[in-house]
């Protein structure tokens, strides 16, 4: 039996972090800390708020 591990978590659904009040020079740090294995990270505007979204990619 073999076991494989990943150094970063994987999620099945997108995660959203509110970064509306985050300084712009800190958004890249937030993106790095919220990135998961094989995912896409992007900004999304909804109702006047800004969210950092981490969406899983298909393997």
Image: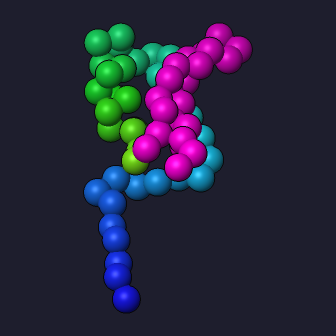
Q: Quick check: 18 left or right of 36?
A: right
Magenta stretch: helix, strand or loop mostly: strand
Q: How many marks?
A: 0
Which residue is at 37% across, 29% downward? 31
Q: Does any portion of residue 18 appear in the rendered image?
A: no
Q: Nearer the viewer, residue 21 or 31?
A: 31
Q: Is residue 58 something that shows in the picture?
A: yes
Query: Residue at left 57%, top 45%?
Result: 58
38 or 20, nearer to the observer: 38
Furthest toward the bottom, the residue is 1
Position of 29 relative to 47 (above/below): below
Spot occupied by residue 40 in the image (x, y as percentages of width and height): 48, 33
* Residue that lies at the very extreme toward the right in this rendered image: 47
Please provide percent x and percent y for residue 21: 45, 16
11 vs 15: above or below: below
Q: Which residues are magenta?
A: 38-59
Q: Is residue 10 magenta?
A: no
Q: Say which quarter of the image contains residue 36.
A: top left
């Amino acid at each position: 039996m073999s076991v494989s591990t990943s150094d970063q978590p994987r999620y099945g659904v997108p995660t959203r972090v509110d970064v509306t009040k985050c300084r712009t020079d800190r958004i890249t740090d937030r993106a790095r800390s919220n990135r998961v294995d094989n995912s896409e990270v992007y900004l999304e505007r909804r109702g006047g708020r800004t969210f950092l979204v981490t969406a899983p990619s298909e393997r």
